[in-house]
Image: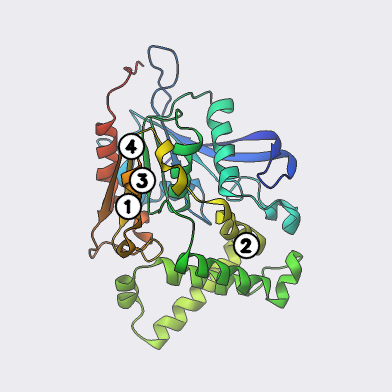
Amino acid sequence: MQSAEAHVTLHHFRFGGGETLAAVRQNYRTLGTPRRGTDGTVANAVLLLHGTTGDGTQFLSPETAEHLFGPGQPLALDEYFVILPDALGHGGSSKPSDGLGSRFPQYGYADIVSAQHRLVTEHLGIRTLRLVAGTSMGGMQTWMWGQMYPDAMRALMPIAALPQPVRGRNLLYRRLLIEAIRTDPAYKDGAYDSQPPSVGIAFNILGLMTHGVSALEVAVDSIPTADQRVRQEADHAVQHQDANDAIWEFAASFDYDPGPRLGEITAPLLAVNFEDDEVNPNQLGVLQRAIEHVERGRAVVVPTSTASDGHLSLTHARLWASHVQEILEWTADGPPVSS
């Protein structure tokens, strides 16, 4: 699927921790064409936010794009203008591996959302987004968008994300992953010349946590298949990931705590989680309790099926595309869009 890629430079970017960079690169891609309403402002813009270690191309994979952007699909590109930013610290946006390494400021999710907002408003000139939606980390940031910029969108759809601080197994695997890299002698306090082998271990930990129990039961049925999977995951990570980037990415959730401000979300919100997601365990009832504090909030838990894969069910848009259509129909009332 063809997308237009560009970037904007955000000058004098101040991080939540107080550090400042003279310039931060915010990379993004777009699909479709912006259309303006009767007031002259863009009325069909949709912001889609990706997960940790990914980038905006996540939504261009066939298992996602084919169920979202084609003719007759919920976000058909003859109707919507879709914005796919690379989060700060990810993809083509500014990140430690660009040169600063371990001297790069430790950004938080609020910094990522702030950079996204500046992209949308200052650079693209969009006053109101038709929809803000995201998966995993992007879903967490969708909750934050609703609180930080409550008038900036007509609808919200966090996917595979709970509106509470990262805790329990979710927090433990993140700290274990970070510790595995930092204690590796090859990491050299962030001044490594080549990727330390621990990056491969770290991303195996990530896969173990995010894949569904049932899916792994089928895929890993012997010692040889387990060993092969571990080697393949490790080799891929060492070739395609960066140790400092990974540490910063998994540490960035330190400032995530939307719970106390759920009542400040005024846009209609449809939260979608997955029954077999071990990162966001449904059996704890967190989402069900939290949604009661969102004035115009609804929650859906997608049942486990042969098509689901734990937290990574988010990569299979056929499991949740109907809910994109649901939130768009729910919030259809608004100013007409002209060509």
Image quadrant where residue 209 sits: bottom left
Q: Which residue is mark 1?
A: 289
x 38%, y 61%: residue: 280
First of labels 2, 4 by sequence position? 2
Please state if 258 lies on the left or on the right of 111 as rendered.
left
Inter-mark Cα distance, 3 to 1: 32 Å
Mark 3, other Cα within 10 Å: few <14 / some 14–19 / many ≥20: many
Q: Are marks 3 and 2 in contact (CB under 8 Å)?
A: no
Of callouts 1 and 4, the N-terminal one: 1
User: Rounded to the nearest whole Å, what is the CA distance between mark 1 and mark 2?
Assistant: 32 Å
Residue at screen point 47% across, 35% down: 30
| Residue 132, numbered label | none
Reading the image, the residue beneath label 4 is 295
Compute the Cα span from label 1 to label 4.
13 Å
- Residue 189 or residue 86, whichever sits in front: 189
Write down the residue under mark 3.
65
Q: Which residue is mark 2?
A: 247
Amino acid type, label 2 = Ile
The residue drawn where x is 69% and y is 55% is 97
Characterize the local packing of mark 2: few (<14), some (14-19) or many (20 or more) Cα atoms within 10 angstroms.
Answer: many
- Distance CA(mark 3)–CA(mark 2): 29 Å
Considering only vertical position in the picture, is 49 above or below 332?
below
The three-letter amino acid code for the residue at tag 4 is Glu
